[in-house]
Amino acid sequence: MTYKTHLSTGLLFSSTVFLLIYEIELSPVLIILLIISTVLGSSAPDLDTPTGELWHKVPGGSLISRIVHPVFIGGHRHLSHSIIGLGIFTGLFYLLTHLTH
């Protein structure tokens, strides 16, 4: 998948979940937060490659990508595209959201 297909899939999923399943009322702030979180979340599978599109859009992304790249064992499409990787990222997300309360 490319950056655009990751983003398209993320937007479709977010729209489906938040508008059709949960039927939330959207405010301008919530729309902005949903778009930002969708872009970041749908780009996450390609964070294991220094040439990922998101790294080009973030200030200092080239440097950050070189620091993060060794963390992903096996290179691109290994940890971040696996069930184990999904579990790790889900666990980290869960911890981050519950530690902030």
Image (spheres, helix red, strand yellow):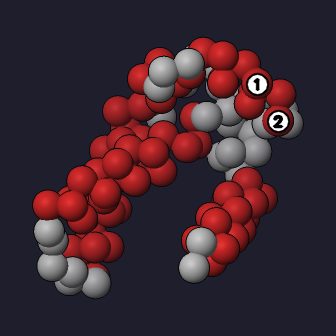
Residue at image x 75%, y 40%? Answer: 78
- Kind of element beneath mark 2: helix
Residue found 61% across the figure and 34% down from its top: 47
The residue type indicated by label 2 comes to: Val
Q: Does residue 49 appear to the left or right of 38 in the view shown?
A: right
Pick whichever, 99 or 45, lies toward us: 99
* Residue in the foreground of this view, choosing between 96 and 22: 96
Quadrant assignment for the C terminus: bottom right
Task: Tell which tag, 2 or 1, sits nearer the viewer.
Answer: 1
Quickly name the residue at label 2.
71
Measured in 3D between alpha carbons, the distance from the residue under mark 2 to the one under mark 1, in whole angstroms, is: 8 Å
Packing grade of label 2 (10 A; few <14, some 14-19, many >=20) is few
Q: Residue at x 42, y 31 (%)?
A: 3
Q: Position of residue 22 (x, y in %)?
A: 28, 84
Q: Position of residue 38 (x, y in %)?
A: 37, 52
* Rendered residue at 55%/43% (across/down): 44
Q: Is residue 70 left or right of residue 18?
A: right
Task: Tell me which amino acid carries mark 1.
Answer: Ile
Residue 90 drawn at (x, y percent): 65, 65
Label 1 sits on residue: 67
Q: Residues within 10 Å of mark 1 (few under 14, many from 20)?
A: few
- As displayed, is residue 48 above or below residue 39? above
Vertical placement of residue 8 versus 30, above or below: above
